[in-house]
Image (cartoon, rainbow, N blue to C red):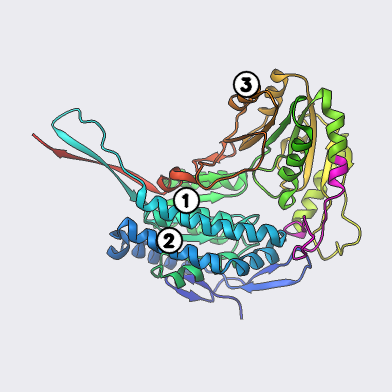
């Protein structure tokens, strides 16, 4: 019997095709899930619209909604191990990383509980005989579409602020990682979230996702994923004249100047590209190294990469698990083959590891490639895997020209002991997040998003709540 899912305020088996999820570490079947038909998607959307408009939800006081979010956070914390295990068996991240992401999900709900009852509106200065207030109101029903690489954090970062803003949410998780979303829905039910305010629709984006975002009840779309899919979603949103928040791909530059602390910089580079097997939107996949230390940095990285421990994600000693699927490993392998054909030199990795069952598990070695220019395809296209391309630069002007020569603009890391130079580069690099002498430090309290084809809008922080609300101006005459 396929696993059921919450839709229209109840759990149903779904009348659509059965969806299978596979453990990428073993190739074994993890679960069979039901999926909805177009009719069931439509029924769910209408039920969500009614739930969003129900007076008990729409008129709920901010402190009451905050208390509900705190209860969800408590339930998430109690269920942390279950959530971590579910994510691990579906996308192969190490259990240690999955546990950290489960804790992050609980912290996200706590943060938006606090924001919910403390954020303030504005009273603009009067230009006449009136008092002017701004009111922030929910869109109604939010379609939240999440990726497979970090479902625990991504789903919390959409569901928590959307609920805090007063919306109903229909969550469409990746077809590869559905179980964490279903567990989140159970947790929200246990915490007392009214029926119909959170639905989860499993299935493929081309079917379930398309039916969802085209339904008239959807007032806003929030998507994290690939740029090609994001562009199609943006086209739908534009045709329907509804807002869309898009957090898309990246080819982030990680920069080392000759005066940097090379030990700290190289350790950060390794974490920035290989943590989670490079399956991160902010992975520092293009490493720019000032020419004077280029060879020394490559040698440090080569030695360090070969010490990383790859293995089953549940093992305590494992640092890197498998990629999320066999198909994705094949894609990563094809890019490494392309790098070789373009003249790239494989400094480390470039193959499947020995000693692991790579026929059933999607394992691949962390790979470092040198000898290519920024014009090479592997330096321009998002691989979304454990592949680092190392490129030399001469001076600041050369660096800025190369680093910004990309359609993406999500993140950047800069290593230098000259703060003024680092600040100049941080201002010059076209990216939504810039780290100086660190990398991949993320906070739910700071806005996050991309420039150029890396997306539209900003999630997280106070902006992340307002993202899910529309502004109304109210004038009261005083004459």
Q: Is residue 27 magenta?
A: no
| Left or right position of 188 against 289 | left
Up-down relation of residue 227 to residue 101 (above or below):
above
- Mark 3 or mark 1: name the one nearer the start of the chain: 1
- Front in this rendered view, residue 161 or 301: 301
- Mark 2 or mark 3: name the one nearer the start of the chain: 2
| Left or right position of 137 against 352 | left
Marks 2 and 3: CB-CB under 8 Å? no
Using the rendered image of the protein, determine whether residue 143 is visible from the camera's viewpoint. no
Q: Is residue 314 magenta?
A: yes
| Left or right position of 115 against 150 | left
Categorize mark 1 by other alpha carbons within 10 Å: few (<14), some (14-19), many (20+): many
Identity of the residue drawn at 55% across and 58% down? 105
Where disc 2 sits, the SS reads helix
- Mark 1 or mark 2: name the one nearer the start of the chain: 2
* In this view, the mark in front (2 or 3): 3
Q: Residue furthest right?
A: 354
Q: Which mark is residue 467?
A: none
The image quarter containing residue 97 is bottom right
Location of residue 129 in the rendering, given as x and y in whole percent from the top left corner: 13, 31
Dominant SS of magenta comes to: loop
Q: Residue at label 1? A: 221
Q: Which residues are magenta?
A: 302-326
For the C terminus, the image quarter is top left
Location of residue 255 in the rendering, given as x and y in whole percent from the top left corner: 72, 31
Q: CA distance from mark 1 to mark 2?
A: 21 Å
Using the rendered image of the protein, determine whether residue 257 is visible from the camera's viewpoint. yes
Q: CA distance from mark 2 to mark 3?
A: 42 Å
Where disc 1 sits, the SS reads strand
Q: Residue at label 3? A: 420
The image quarter containing residue 379 is top right
């Amino acid at each position: 019997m396929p696993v059921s899912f919450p839709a229209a305020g109840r759990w149903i088996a779904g009348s659509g095709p059965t969806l299978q999820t596979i453990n990428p570490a073993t190739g074994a079947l993890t679960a069979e899930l039901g999926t909805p038909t177009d009719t069931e998607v439509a029924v769910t959307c209408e039920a969500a619209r009614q739930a969003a408009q129900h007076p008990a939800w729409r008129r709920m006081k901010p402190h009451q909604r905050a208390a509900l979010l705190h209860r969800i956070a408590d339930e998430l914390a109690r269920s942390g191990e279950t959530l971590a295990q579910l994510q691990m068996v579906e996308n192969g991240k190490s259990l240690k990383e999955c546990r950290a992401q489960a804790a992050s999900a609980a912290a996200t709900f706590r943060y938006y509980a606090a924001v919910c009852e403390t954020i303030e509106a504005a009273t603009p200065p009067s230009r006449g005989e009136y008092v002017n207030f701004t009111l922030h109101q929910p869109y109604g029903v939010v379609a939240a579409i999440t990726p497979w690489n970090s479902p625990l954090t991504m789903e919390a970062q959409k569901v928590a602020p959307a609920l805090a803003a007063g919306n109903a949410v229909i969550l469409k998780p990746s077809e590869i990682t559905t179980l964490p979303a279903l567990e989140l829905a159970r947790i929200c039910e246990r915490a007392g979230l009214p029926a119909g305010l959170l639905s989860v629709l499993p299935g493929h984006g081309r079917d379930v996702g398309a039916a969802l975002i085209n339904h008239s009840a959807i007032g806003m779309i929030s998507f994290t994923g690939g740029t090609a899919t994001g562009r199609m979603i943006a086209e739908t949103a534009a045709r329907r004249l509804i807002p869309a928040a898009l957090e898309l791909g990246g080819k982030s530059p990680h920069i080392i100047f000759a005066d940097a602390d090379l030990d700290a910089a190289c350790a950060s580079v390794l974490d920035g590209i290989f943590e989670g097997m490079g399956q991160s939107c902010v992975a520092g996949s293009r490493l720019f190294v000032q020419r004077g230390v280029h060879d020394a940095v490559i040698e440090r990285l080569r030695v360090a990469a070969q010490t990383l421990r790859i293995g089953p994600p549940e093992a305590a000693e494992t640092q890197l698990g498998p990629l999320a699927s066999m198909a994705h490993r094949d894609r990563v392998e094809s890019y490494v083959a392309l790098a070789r054909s373009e003249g790239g030199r494989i400094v480390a990795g470039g193959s499947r590891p020995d000693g692991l069952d790579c026929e059933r598990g999607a394992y691949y070695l962390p790979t470092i490639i040198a000898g290519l220019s920024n014009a090479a395809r592997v330096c321009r296209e998002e691989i979304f895997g454990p592949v680092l391309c190392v490129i030399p630069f001469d001076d600041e002007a050369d660096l800025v020209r190369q680093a910004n020569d990309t359609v993406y603009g999500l993140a950047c890391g800069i290593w230098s002991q000259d703060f003024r130079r680092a600040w100049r580069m941080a201002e010059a690099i076209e990216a939504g997040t810039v780290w100086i002498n660190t990398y991949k430090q993320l906070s739910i309290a700071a806005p996050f998003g991309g420039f150029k084809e890396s997306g539209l809008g900003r999630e997280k922080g106070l902006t992340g709540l307002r993202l899910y609300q529309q502004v109304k101006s109210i004038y009261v005459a005083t004459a």
